[in-house]
Each structure stands twice: as C-alpha cells, then as structure tokens.
Amino acid sequence: MQFDQILQYALSGLSSGAIYALIGIGFSIIYNATGIINFAQGEFVMLGGMLTLFFLQLLKAPIWVAIPCAVAASTLGGILFERLAIRPLRQPTPINLVIITIGGSILIRGLAMLLWGKDTHAIPSFSGDEPIAIGGATILPQHIWILGVTLIIIAINKYYFYHTISGKAMRACAYNRRAAGLVGIDVRRMVLFSFIISSAMGAVAGIIVAPLTMVAYDVGVMLGLKGFCAAIIGGMSSGIATVVGGLILGVLESLGAGLISSGYKDAIAFIILLLLLFFRPQGLFGKAESERV
C-alpha cells in the first residue's frame, strides 16, 4: 500500500469525521442540558440539505440566501420539537424520552418523504469541483469548506459556553440542574437553547456535506447514528473530545473502506460503538464519572 493512498484515505476521513463531530456535538449539547439522547438529531441534518434544495430550486434563491434560510427553518423545527414533544412531559422516564425522540425522527422523515419524495437530489458545491492536490493526494474544494466551517463552529461553540451568560448557565445546568434552578437559572429556557443550538448545528452539517453525498429524505438516519458514535467516543462531551472522536471515526471508517472493503464502511462505525459500550462506556477520553460538559 503506497503512502499516497493512505494520505488520500486519511484526508477523506478527516472531512467525514468533521461532519460526525458537528452532529456528535449536537447530541452532547442536548444530553448535557437535559439528559436526553435526541435520536432525531440526524433528521435536522437531513432538513438542512433538503431545505437548502427547496430554497434553491423552488424559490430560485441564490445559495448565499438559501443557506441561512435553511438553517433558520431547521432551527424553527428544533424549537417546535422541543415545545411540542419534550416540554409537555412531566417526570418522564429515560425510555419515554428515547421513544419520543425516535418517534419524532420517524415523523420528520415521513413528512420529508411526502414533501420531497424518495428521489436523491444534488446540491451544487460552494466553489467548484476542481480537485486540489495535497502531497500525492487530492481533495475537492468542498472538503476544505467542511473542515473550515467545522473549525469556525467549534470556535463559536467554545466562546459561547465559556464567555457568555447563557452559555455558562447551560454549563451549570449540565453539572446540576436542581442547583442551577435554585440560583435563578431558567432550566426550561436552557433546554430550549440546547435544541436551538443542536438543530442549527445539525442543519449546517447537512448543508456543507450535501454537495458530496447528495440529499434525500432518509440520509439523516446513518449520519445521525455516526454522530452519536462520535459523541460516545468523546464521552458525551460538547468539547474537543467529541471533535476528536468524530475525526477518529471518520479516519478509521475511510481507512477500513479503502484497505478492506467499501462494503464494511458503515459497519465499522457500529463495531466501534459496540466495542466502546462494552469495554469503555464512558468514552475514550472520559473518566468513570466524567463531567458532562
């Protein structure tokens, strides 16, 4: 196996891993604020791509208008999901929450199928399709967009949680929701903020990856599961651990597909997830009782 091939697989894996990291952070933010594993997170990734296509084709909007409109519409979907499905619950059990988020995922996917059909659609790349040579490997300009946007979002996420009042309040809820409420933090508002942030991040992930993978009503299922795997690797942290977890998953998946068989590409993520849950459920970077933010 030549070095150029390994480099090619690694670069492709980093791009995929960046997407998994964004989705994984969305899982972690909601989990830390609410204790909920939101299995509908992948559907917001799908909505980002499908709504961008909607604004591009049906409304004839330029891409620089379609993207923020798609993110805003997906975020509105996250708000409605929290308001209608999560907030009305009174002392729900963990299994109730899992069933509700899975049901929400099925509902969103079904509505998307009715609105846009079962066909796969393409979104134009942001800056052309001319490959860029790096060493002996090549990557598309869209990969650069994916890595760049991911870094920007991670930086904004870091600033928000450590340098803003609402971000610090969300961290306080993650440590101890009851204590946060006793000192005057509106816990229910923080839960809403967590859904707003995670749905917006999921939509952005779906938009920047759509020119490479194309979009369809069911693309969010697999992306959501791989994002969940990245979050598990990172110990359900909304910080750098989940980012590293996503990159590790992406690189291993790409290397496995290239060196073994592309047929095992999706299976690799689930094998990693099962091994982690069995041998190290707190994640690669977490302690036995890790902090949740």
Image: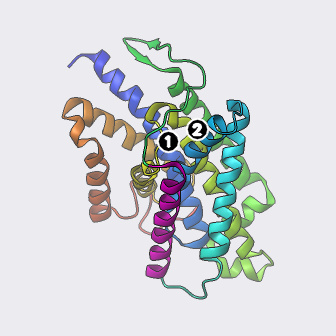
Q: Position of residue 128 (x, y in %)?
A: 56, 18
Q: Label the magenta part by its dominant secondary structure.
A: helix
* Callout 1: SS: helix
Up-down relation of residue 199 to residue 128 (above or below): below
Tag 2 residue: 150
Residue 19 - label: 1
Q: Is residue 98 magenta?
A: yes
* Callout 2: SS: helix
Residue drawn at point x = 55 percent, y = 53 percent: 115
Towards the viewer: 243 or 83: 83
Q: Quadrant of the C terminus?
A: bottom right
Q: Position of residue 16 (x, y in %)?
A: 43, 37
Disc 2 packing (10 Å; few <14; some 14–19; many ≥20) = many
Q: Position of residue 127 (x, y in %)?
A: 60, 20
State the residue lying farthest toward the bottom: 91
Distance Cα–Cα, label 1 vs label 2: 8 Å
Q: Which residues are magenta?
A: 94-117
Up-down relation of residue 227 to residue 146 (above or below): below
Residue drawn at point x = 80 percent, y = 60 percent: 165
Residue 223 seen from this side: yes
Up-down relation of residue 201 to residue 65 (above or below): below
The amino acid on which the numbered mark 2 sits, given as a three-letter code, is: Thr
Towards the viewer: 223 or 73: 73
